[in-house]
C-alpha cells in the first residue's frame, strides 16, 4: 500500500507527520516510482482552468495530482480557509511533496501559487532533491473566469 511505503513520522512535528499520512491515504493508488521524477507546479487564479489542465495532463503522464482544495477537505472536516489553516495545509503539502518525490513519484501541485514568495519553497524542494521542476501558469480571459 502506498501509505505504508511513504509513511515516516516527523519526529519534530508529529501532528504534521500524521497529517501527511492522512493525505497520502486520501490519494488512492499512486503511479509507479521512476528514477527521475518530475515536479510540475501549476499556478493561476481561481477559475482559470488549472484543475482541468492538470486532469488532462495526468491522463498522459504517470503523475499524482496534489490539488490543494481536495487536500484541504481531506485534512479538515469543516475547512475555515483561515490563514492559520492555510499555513498548516501548505506545511503538510510541502512535506508530502518531498516524500513523494524522494520515493520517485512524479507529481503535479495544483494550487494558486500566485506569488513568487510562495513558490520559493517549492523551488527549494526541487533543488534539494535534484528533480526536474516544470512551472505552468494557467490564464483565462477575465470574462471567462467571471462566468465560471
Image: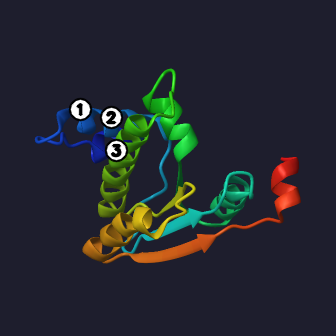
Mark 1: secondary structure:
helix
Where residue 37 appears, x then y in whole percent? 41, 70
Instruction: Answer with mark 2 or mark 3, whichever residue precedes in sequence.
Output: 2
Label 3 near label 1: C-beta < 8 Å?
no
Q: Tell me the tag on residue 92.
A: 3
Mark 2 is surrounded, within 10 Å at the Cα level, by few (under 14), some (14 to 19) or many (20 or more) other residues, namely many
Q: Which residue is mark 1?
A: 15
Q: Kindly give the residue lying farthest to the top in the view shown.
A: 78
Mark 3 is surrounded, within 10 Å at the Cα level, by few (under 14), some (14 to 19) or many (20 or more) other residues, namely many
Image check: 48 left or right of 44? right
Where residue 30 appears, x then y in whole percent? 47, 49
Query: Whole-Å distance between the Cαs marked 2 and 3?
Result: 7 Å
Image check: 107 left or right of 127? right
Q: Which residue is mark 2?
A: 19
Label 3 near label 2: C-beta < 8 Å?
yes
Instruction: Answer with mark 1 or mark 3, whichever residue precedes in sequence.
Output: 1
Where residue 65 appears, x then y in whole percent? 55, 53
Q: 25 or 146, which is in the foreground? A: 146
- Say which residue appears at 48% left-offset and 21% top-offset: 77
Mark 3: secondary structure:
helix
User: Can the viewer see residue 46?
Assistant: yes
Q: How is the image coloured?
A: rainbow
Image check: 128 left or right of 136? left
**Eyeballing the image, is 135 above or below 140?**
below
Amino acid at each position: 500500500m502506498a501509505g505504508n511505503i511513504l509513511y515516516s513520522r516527523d519526529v519534530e512535528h508529529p501532528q504534521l507527520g500524521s497529517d501527511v499520512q492522512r493525505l497520502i491515504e486520501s490519494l488512492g493508488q499512486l503511479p509507479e516510482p521512476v528514477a527521475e521524477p518530475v515536479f510540475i507546479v501549476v499556478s493561476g487564479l481561481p477559475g482559470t482552468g488549472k484543475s482541468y489542465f492538470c486532469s488532462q495532463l495526468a491522463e498522459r503522464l504517470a503523475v499524482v495530482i496534489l490539488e490543494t482544495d481536495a487536500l484541504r477537505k481531506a485534512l479538515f472536516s469543516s475547512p475555515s480557509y483561515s490563514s492559520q489553516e492555510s499555513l498548516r495545509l501548505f506545511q503538510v503539502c510541502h512535506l508530502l511533496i518531498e516524500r513523494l518525490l524522494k520515493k520517485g513519484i512524479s507529481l503535479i501541485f495544483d494550487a494558486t501559487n500566485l506569488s513568487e514568495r510562495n513558490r520559493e519553497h517549492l523551488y527549494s524542494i526541487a533543488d534539494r532533491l535534484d528533480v526536474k521542476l516544470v512551472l505552468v501558469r494557467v490564464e483565462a480571459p477575465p470574462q471567462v473566469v467571471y462566468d465560471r
